[in-house]
Amino acid sequence: MLFMCHQMAMKKEAQDKQKAEQRRKAQSVSDIPIIWILGGPGCGKGTQCAKIVEKYGFTHLSSGDLLRDEVASGSDKGRELQELMVSGALVPNAEVLSLLNAAITRAKGASKGFLIDGYPREKNQGIEFEAQIAPADLAIYFDCSEETMLKRILARAAAATVKRADDNEATIRSRLQTFKRNTSDILALYEEKTLTINAERDVEDIFMEVVEAIDCVLQKKERESKIC
Ligand SMILES: Nc1ncnc2c1ncn2[C@@H]1O[C@H](COP(=O)(O)OP(=O)(O)O)[C@@H](O)[C@H]1O
């Protein structure tokens, strides 16, 4: 008798697990907010992302961090990526998008929203993301002068205990060039859903604008879920 009860309990547990997994798979990524975080190196994206995660519990995915993890894994692909990253160039989108896609798929069942930090870095990245994953609800662009970005990033590099391979002046200048070359196209294509924020102000003042925009997205999502 005891054995049968135990078997039934095990079967129920397995069924519950299977149902939860089915629910997780059925949840579409577009049901939760997707926010792109745009801005050059040193514009303060990292600081604002940390504050957003703290307030909203969103999943923060930084394309740069995902790429650095791949490099740290020591794979052959990682070595190829490292070469491009050290030169300040962009790595092929197929690599970045597949890392992002895998991370989103892993997290989506339990996620309240996604902050996609450092992506898109060129127009086509945005187009491919929306075609393969889901439309972004909002893009926040942290606008900062090149001079300020360079100053901030050199100061950060000088203070860091663990040095990034691409935090030397030559690579930083090249990263800034890459950024400058591509950003106006992204901003033009996604003008309607982009909020541009002056990022050369106090962290809390910037965050107030960020919160206003995210609250708006959350309200819109809530309304859409009621209609569906
Ligand atoms: N979306 C992306 N597409 C292509 N390459 C990327 C992308 N995101 C990051 N990278 C690569 O990783 C490097 C570091 O990115 P990141 O950590 O975001 O630094 P930063 O914004 O400070 O330049 C970039 O210079 C680039 O080589």
Image (tube, rainbow, N blue to C red):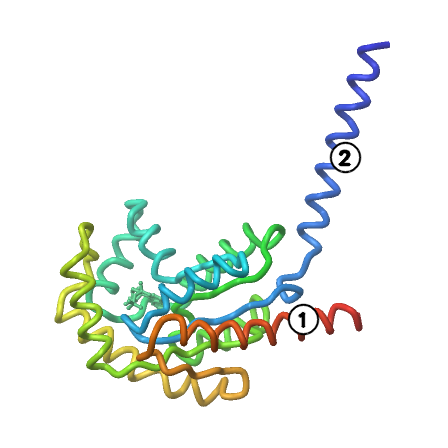
- Mark 1 sits near ligand 1, with its Cβ under 8 Å away: no
Residue at left offset 14%, top offset 65% = 168
Q: Earlier in the sequence, mark 1 or mark 2?
A: 2
Q: Which element is circle 2 on?
A: helix
Q: Residues within 10 Å of mark 1 (few under 14, many from 20)?
A: some
Residue type at numbered disc 1: Lys
Front position among marks 1 and 2: 1
Image location (x, y in percent) of residue 224: 73, 73
Residue at left offset 43%, top offset 83% = 196
Residue type at numbered disc 2: Gln
Q: Residues within 10 Å of mark 2 (few under 14, many from 20)?
A: few
Residue at left offset 41%, top offset 76% = 205
Image location (x, y in percent) of residue 122: 39, 78
Front in this rendered view, residue 203 or 132: 203
Image vertical order of residue 102 relative to residue 149, above or below: above
Q: Which mark is residue 10?
A: none
Within the image, what quadrant is residue 27 found in? bottom right
Image vertical order of residue 6 relative to residue 42, above or below: above
Q: Which residue is mark 1?
A: 221
Disc 1 to disc 2: CB gap under 8 Å: no
Ligand number 1: quarter of image: bottom left
In which quadrant will I find the N terminus?
A: top right
Within the image, what quadrant is residue 124 found in? bottom left
- Mark 2 sits near ligand 1, with its Cβ under 8 Å away: no
Image location (x, y in percent) of residue 92: 36, 67
Q: Which residue is mark 2?
A: 15
Image location (x, y in percent) of residue 83: 22, 60
